[in-house]
Image (cartoon, coloured by chain):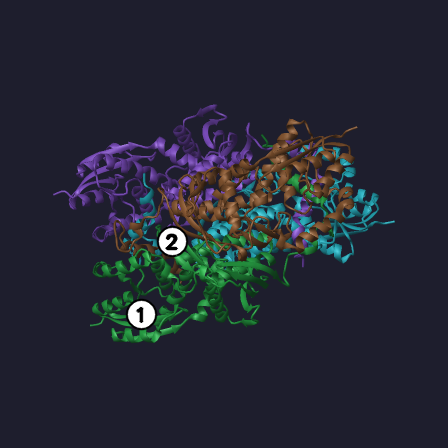
Chain colours: A cyan, B purple, C green, D brown
Amino acid sequence: MSKGTVVLSYSGGLDTSCILVWLKEQCYDVIAFMANIGQNEDFEAARNKAESLGAKKVFIEDLRTEFVEDFIWPAIQANAVYEDRYLLGTALARPCIARRQVEIARREGAHFVSHGATGKGNDQIRFELTCYTLYPEVKIIAPWRIPEFYNRFRGRTDLMEYAQIHAPADLYLMTKNPEDSPSIPDVLEIEFKNGMPVKVTNVKEGTSKDSPLDIFSYLNEIGGKHGIGRIDIVENRFIGMKSRGIYETPGGTILINAHLDIETFTMDKEVRRIKQGLGVKFSELVYNGFWYSPECDFVRHCIAKSQENVEGKVQLSLFKGQIYILGRESAKSLYNEELVSMDIQGDYDPCDASGFIRINAVRFALISP
Amino acid sequence: MSKGTVVLSYSGGLDTSCILVWLKEQCYDVIAFMANIGQNEDFEAARNKAESLGAKKVFIEDLRTEFVEDFIWPAIQANAVYEDRYLLGTALARPCIARRQVEIARREGAHFVSHGATGKGNDQIRFELTCYTLYPEVKIIAPWRIPEFYNRFRGRTDLMEYAQIHAPADLYLMTKNPEDSPSIPDVLEIEFKNGMPVKVTNVKEGTSKDSPLDIFSYLNEIGGKHGIGRIDIVENRFIGMKSRGIYETPGGTILINAHLDIETFTMDKEVRRIKQGLGVKFSELVYNGFWYSPECDFVRHCIAKSQENVEGKVQLSLFKGQIYILGRESAKSLYNEELVSMDIQGDYDPCDASGFIRINAVRFALISP
Amino acid sequence: MSKGTVVLSYSGGLDTSCILVWLKEQCYDVIAFMANIGQNEDFEAARNKAESLGAKKVFIEDLRTEFVEDFIWPAIQANAVYEDRYLLGTALARPCIARRQVEIARREGAHFVSHGATGKGNDQIRFELTCYTLYPEVKIIAPWRIPEFYNRFRGRTDLMEYAQIHAPADLYLMTKNPEDSPSIPDVLEIEFKNGMPVKVTNVKEGTSKDSPLDIFSYLNEIGGKHGIGRIDIVENRFIGMKSRGIYETPGGTILINAHLDIETFTMDKEVRRIKQGLGVKFSELVYNGFWYSPECDFVRHCIAKSQENVEGKVQLSLFKGQIYILGRESAKSLYNEELVSMDIQGDYDPCDASGFIRINAVRFALISP
Amino acid sequence: MSKGTVVLSYSGGLDTSCILVWLKEQCYDVIAFMANIGQNEDFEAARNKAESLGAKKVFIEDLRTEFVEDFIWPAIQANAVYEDRYLLGTALARPCIARRQVEIARREGAHFVSHGATGKGNDQIRFELTCYTLYPEVKIIAPWRIPEFYNRFRGRTDLMEYAQIHAPADLYLMTKNPEDSPSIPDVLEIEFKNGMPVKVTNVKEGTSKDSPLDIFSYLNEIGGKHGIGRIDIVENRFIGMKSRGIYETPGGTILINAHLDIETFTMDKEVRRIKQGLGVKFSELVYNGFWYSPECDFVRHCIAKSQENVEGKVQLSLFKGQIYILGRESAKSLYNEELVSMDIQGDYDPCDASGFIRINAVRFALISP
């Protein structure tokens, strides 16, 4: 007698294969769901594996475009960086993947969803908060939090964990070691509209990309070639543990740098201060798994509003792991060369600055030592 | 008949030389004051020049140690970055210089101080707010805001300004072009105590520095050698204009990166969130010239308090304009390898995470679409 | 020979009458402009006075509706309170008045505007920032900052100032002394939509008002009758001085209390936290005179967005200077009686709270003494 | 065979009496612990009851002084108000009570603590987070989260809950109905030092109190007499539910009002802005149960630092549920009557305001419509 149908987020790897088999042992019908968000994977091999392990159905879904448009682009608009350093790659992917998984579960009449995230990490939270919001009645099976499962399978994972921690050099899949990267920079021009990239041009080669997915893929590729976006950090998980993370985000790193530049060029100073605070909040919400919360929705709305005039082109070069901003231009620029120039006075009366400074000092006279 | 004595912040250059002469023409006795904060300058030549132009006295003051200890170190503790990018070099130097200038003015019985900062920039504000706080009765003469002065001398400055804007390649004095920098990284270990650097070791060479000034000078030197810390940005001045800035901060860039790393390693997550907000505030205050304000004093106190356990060592490599964190260690680490490890469960019960997630989702059930 | 036309913000009082005459002496053509924002004033007497003093034209404009709809309602949505106590009455009126004054100036081809605000206060800033934004080329004549004017007229003002400070009991124009107010409460029901009041009903009398101006006027009247909204505070002016303020805001005080209640009832907790911070920012901007700034525009947009579900009815009683919330109801309520009740468990599993608490304590184990 | 000793937070009421008996049934040795934090209670009757129900020992601890000094005073310094309205009474008491309970548990060698807080509320969290921090190895027994307990006893609680919700008029124990309160105000003078009350004087009667406990008790009494501090609100619990709360906080309401007044009088404007943000954070932390967290400790330190000059006397009257500030005086006042006065110019040059305003408008010229 089946307990019902469960949609399992399946990776093709050892972990979720064990889970698939175990779920079947527990008398569930298992639908394997794989999301293609741009990772390098042999999806057909994974499909065969899932089927051979007893999956009733296998769904392989290409989410690459919606991942870039619905999740990465808003993060770029927000200059989203967690704890000053982490660019939120996985944190952005989780709600995208879980959204589709829940759609499949609803469509297939499945009352259960399952995943291979561990019981100490962030991904379980990101996954499950999304599910609880979009499908409140769903039951979630998280085997790595179920003693019967983890007591049986822990050994194997230990090994993998060990391998991962002790061999960081092999961890990098997308980026070249900067020491081995080209000695000649590539020069790019990235164009933004509404704070989102709409075109990237390789200036020397004269080639360009203009769909969101193409832009992002290209920046990952060329950023990777120059060893851009590697970090080794300690971060604070939502559940309060510190963990070490080694990440590579070549495309995201280029985009955040370019966006930050065009934003400062076109956005009013004080609007930007407020928006900066909202961006910090956004980053924290996304990291913690609250993409589909009312507060994240609200913050996204506000940030999007702030981006209405963030448009123009940024020129930059990539070289040995580093990004150099070379210049920027925009029809919406608030940089006024004449106003700032020392040789043109225009409407600006330097005497006003005296009053400005003295008024700012009024408070100090009272407190002065 | 003398109008009295003015202490002029003198650079030895064309600008402040003009001002010196003009002040004398206006019947002031002029004391020239030069601050050595580590810039490359022929101070004795400048002294001779000032004297030959008619300075009554010349003071050349070595402020290098107090600049590093009293101003740069607190900025490192704060991870002080203005508008996400600018490391505040000049903004930190101004209150240090003005503090000494005011001391001299008081000691010498001068009722006036003067400077060569322009009427559109930030430095005039930083300089004058410091003076108004530390010497409220002082009169400030800012020639670049006085029509009789700037109408007469503007032409010459135009030229300099022009040169500066159109020749950025020559602007870099401390840093090598990353393309020309060594192909072999240097590896450093920086040790912190109370969030302040106490020692830097070149791991390969085995050499080390342990006084604040030596540490900072060494990091400027070795960072410069690897082309670290160049930026080309548009920033928002306090007076509301956007301006383009090209900066190089090799030592500061290394220190901020290392400090950020050891801080995240040793500081509680939620304390850090609050402190991060205070750091943003601090950066803005310093940029705007409010170092000697009650609010900056308060924020510095709070930040210093947060640094009590920020100690340990960070290993990093410098290569082609980039800094790579290699690792960190600390007796005050809050990173608990056992707690975070997948193979050891310890006191942590993964089932708790289920409750944690479900309680976090309580709000969403009510709002779910 | 006329120097041109100036539109003067005219009150009918001694101050601006002196200014009118002085402006004429200075060879300006003067247009007197009076704004009716609900104050008790004999506008026709003022018109005659202005004309007899030589005003070329007199405009008396009824701004009451736009003042309530465009300025007060957004402040209610924001729960706008400056420094935890001041409800911003005058600060909201200033941009409303200056906006119309600038419209008249443009229409009448006047290149000058003038006002009677003093040189130490906030109103000069609120007035002038509005003018500079909406009519950047305008020239502003602020006689209380012009030595020839204030040296001549200071004496007279001293007297008025003195009177004002030393006779606060007479200052209250709208509110009864609570000790003399009725011994029987009035009970009101205020209905909100989009965070704005749409109807007020006097429950006992069965009467109601439903246009913005009627609602606000009625609340001022009935609040005044019960002595609601008097405060005696020290506040921080934008220019850095502390000043004493004695205010009465009967209608505003009732509305802020009712709005706060319905907002907490219908708005998600975490959205409200973010919105609360934006409201503090909004209050500061309005107080300082930045209504027509890009940042205030941005903040208003975000706050309005947050109010989409803020609707429902609040019951309250007014008695002896105090407002008591009696209850609230809303179709958009997020208060779930069943969920919160101890006797119904529903979907909520109390065991989840154990996990929630333990995960929240994970950080503490590491730091525990 | 005993499972060990449990220290139970005992109230003397039905709930915790049931728990006491049930714990004994579950083979625990029970120590009953009662905290006197100023509530009206027959402690000796409760002692007898606990003993008759089988408590091995009974501890009745007078925590009144430490509650006021260690918990309420810091909350006054912070102007701690949760969600703009709630004064945190219970939230402050919980860590005080749990701290002593844990001390007793350690001293008596008990490995367990227990409490009668429900599974949907805030108190369970406040209690347990304190225990986990101060006694990390302790085991907590929360019967209202244990199915065997709550399934058996739920019926009885339903009744109590029902009574509580449907009879709010009887809920008020400390405050008179404002309608029945005296028609003659009492006038108080409260003196502060370091932001903490050090003396309260009834001006008409000439009596005064000067120990923390006496001050607080007196303000509760006289505030209660005048019907001060009643509120009926909806609030957001930490676990994400909204709940209705009816509170009375006479002493706290008076103190927060008086403290706010003297603080604004003596604290620099910009320090206060930063401190205000920290106060909001503090309120949230305390409400959520994080008194003994590193971040709350940090925030308390910063707030205490801000209070160094917050001293002086505030005069106020109490009348029919309302507090009216009558005046304030302080040796540390930053209110400068001469500076703010219109008739004295002093060092302040009103012309400076023109420059101040124009510089503030520099940004707007670029964006003007």
Image check: B360 left or right of D296? right
**Residue D125 visible somewhere in the drawing:** yes
How far across and how far down the image is residue D61, in percent? 61, 34
**Residue A118 visible somewhere in the drawing:** no
Q: Which residue is mark 2?
A: B240
How far across and how far down the image is residue A104, in percent? 74, 55
Q: Which residue is mark 1?
A: C12
The crowding category of the residue bearing disc 2, from other C-alpha atoms within 10 Å (few below 14, some 14 to 19, many at least 20), is: some
Work out whether residue A167 or residue C299 is closer to the camera in this orientation and state it: C299
Could you tell me which chain the residue with mark 1 belongs to? C
Q: Quadrant of the C terminus of chain C?
A: top right
Work out whether residue D202 or residue B107 is closer to the camera in this orientation and state it: D202
**Callouts 2 and 1 on one subunit:** no
Extreme residue toward the top, this view: B206
Indicate which disc residue C207 carries. none
How far across and how far down the image is residue B20, in percent? 21, 42
Image check: C254 left or right of B346? left
Extreme residue toward the front, this view: D205
Please tell me which residue is depicted at 63% across the width and 59% down the height of the picture: C333
Work out whether residue D83 or residue C245 is closer to the camera in this orientation and state it: C245
Name which residue type carries label 1: Gly
Q: Is residue C35 above or below residue B261?
A: below
Disc 2 to disc 1: CB gap under 8 Å: no
